[in-house]
Amino acid sequence: MIRPLYTTFIVLQLAFAGNNLMAQAPPAGGVATFEEANRLMEEKFFGQAAEVWKELLDKDPENANLNWKVGEAYMMSYNEKSKALPYLRTASAKRGKSYGGLNTAGYNPFDPKERNAPPQVDYWLAKAYHLNNDFDNADVYYRQFIAEAGDRSDFKPMAEHGLEQTANARTLKAAPKDYVISNVGDVVNGQFPDFSPVVSVDGNALFFTSRRLRADSSNAGVIDPVAGLPFENVYVSYKDRTGKWQAPEPLNINPPFGHLATVNVSADGQTLILYKDDNGDGNLYESKLVGEIWSDPVKMGGDINSRSWETHGALSADGNTFYFVSNRPGGLGGRDIYRVVKLPNGEWSKAQNLGNTVNTRYEEDGVFIHPDGKTLYFASTGHTSMGGFDIFTTEQQADGTWSAPVNIGYPLNTVDDDVFFVSTADGRRGYFSSDKMGGYGEKDIYFVDFPAEMETEGLAVLKGFIVPAPGQQLPPSAILYVTDKATGEVKTYKPRQRDGVYVAILAPCKNYNLDYRINDKTIHTEDIFVECESAYQEINKEVYLNPVQLAGEAGVVNLPKGAPPGSKEPGQPVKEGVTVVGPDSKVKPPVAVVPPGGKEEPPVAVVPAEPGKAPAPTKEPKTDAVRKQEGEKHVAPDATYAAEFVKYHGYNETGIDLNDAQWKDFIGKVIALIDKQGTVDITIEASASHVPTKTYGTNDKLSTLRMEEASKQLIDAVKAAGKDPKGLLLGSVNHLVQGPKYKGDYKNTDKYGKYQYVKLKAR
């Protein structure tokens, strides 16, 4: 998005009185053209200014000032910094130094007859070499500038910092990280800039900012004069059940004119944090998902927005802490990171600066708080930046302090600005945008896969689908209550209406009751225990509003593929400097998207009804906050089962021993339930440990296979007893990969064996 924050170093135009000893005749192109270019520079239309300066330079190629002007315009431009180097090199070589050091009294940037270049050309030449990864030449000109600069020069400390950054860059590039960087692909990325991605915790919704042309061309003539492109709009792409991103859709809140940009998204993907440039006073807004419509953006309250510039923010997974970036007075540098916390009355507290461990005298931006609530990612031009903004990570300690920020490393960080980064819940993947690695357009969205040792610890994520009957949409009254059985604390989670996806962050080492309700009536309930292991845990549960026949066409084996939601897409691996192209080696056209207001009305939600009865009317679910306000306490329903069976597997084992006494006892109870009730509600849970499996490829596949084989053996056992297996109704499917991190000790069955199982429950 066009914000001054992307322009890390602003050229301070210094106009001084006096005659230029080297001034000669006006430029061959004329005084009017010179003045036009200067006006464009003052109005920050740097790309357009560069073209005008080049017209003059073509007629006077030996003019040091015109070479400087072209180089300066490119260095200040939106996306053309790489073009600056040859012009700055010429300007530096031809610059006369008769003024004596950095005495610029004789240089007038607004005089058409000026032929000399200002002394700061050496600083910008060093910066251009720096951006070109030519650190040796960058150091030469940084040092040359420092040697000539006086202590009052605004550029001297910047040049000194440049030397620090080139040293950092050499160190980081000499020890590249084992990262695999991939382009998200041409379904999301188009020929126009696509950037600032944010991903919901379930990994199923990707929100981003784009300058693309809308499918209905409604913004074809609405051009941002600074960039010469359409204004920034917010789009979203959802994954289907096979893990593939679908065609991006513009949000209904995009304005007809002006910018709206993504900043962050809440853990459940239903609250968006947005940025608006309110006539130069950048502010943070929020919009909430109501059904399938996003509410009008509302400026965030409390001490978050001010008369200063608020550029970025991130909401913690529990919604109780908001981290944001501001350049308000009293900070440590330019932009600093602050935080506010939710008070008992629901209001935000006063803003608190995170302090000098995180913030520097330079610039910070792009803050993101991981779902674990303690790992903070942010961008900074300070610390050990290798040039421009780099991504850093820090962790909040038990006493509330922050650990020393660590540069996330090369090749994710580069010598240019790397600002916006978000991580998945497991810590193994991050999404970001870049214009440096090639792609389909000027900026593309990428993801980076991290090595196993970077996986998150001490976090459990419950996620899944609530699946309505075929042809029906999830009722808006659907809600999940999660009760901490030790404390009685209740939290509510709203599944996304369009696809039934829900997500919740759970503290390990606790017992919970899960209560899935429609119209405040329980449709499924279950007690779970979240293991105490430090490794990342993902609990995937798929719940059916209308329990499906286990032996029918919708049996476990034939259920739609793709659960759990948010499975990781493969992407397109890229190398820096390699352009992604289509089959005909041409940049692909923009992706067709649904225009605002152009999509069909969603079907009316239908609540499952008993045979012969009309569907029950829907009503808004009561959140835990509403219940507290009304003085009503949520009571966890009875989650016991009439029969349960568990089989612990050895390494890579699947299937059940049909002669097992416990299995025979379980089947006997299931048959008795069929005789008594006619139908039996079945829950199947399968688990695999983190011990790698070459046989099945992934532990997720092994877990799924255990679930499928248990389903088949249950059906066969019921048939063998002479009963109709259509009486087995699947209420929910759970499959997990859990337990401690694998450390090469696969023979340690005591350590991993209890996470290798299949469980069947019947009620």
Image: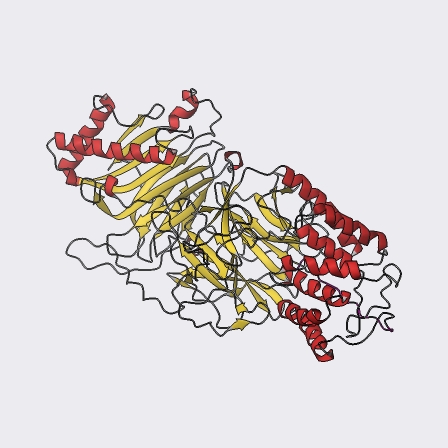
Judge whether residue 8 is colored magenta.
yes
Which stretch did the figure color magenta? 7-19
Quadrant in the picture for the C terminus: top left
User: Of helix, strand and loop, which mostly describes the magenta segment?
Assistant: loop
Q: Is residue 26 above or below residue 748?
A: below
315 left or right of 77 in image: left
Q: Position of residue 151 (x, y in %)?
A: 85, 55
Towards the viewer: 51 or 616: 51
Residue at position x 69%, y 58% from top?
86
Q: Residue furthest left?
A: 722
Q: Is residue 469 above or below residue 670?
A: below
Judge whether residue 161 is colored magenta.
no
Quadrant in the picture for the N terminus: bottom right
Q: Position of residue 463 (x, y in %)?
A: 39, 45
Towards the viewer: 698 or 227: 227
Q: Is residue 233 above or below residue 518?
A: below
659 left or right of 233 in image: left
Q: Position of residue 619 (x, y in %)?
A: 32, 60
Towards the viewer: 380 or 268: 380
Q: Residue furthest top?
A: 747
| Image quadrant in which you'd find residue 107 | bottom right
| Image quadrant in which you'd find residue 473 | bottom left
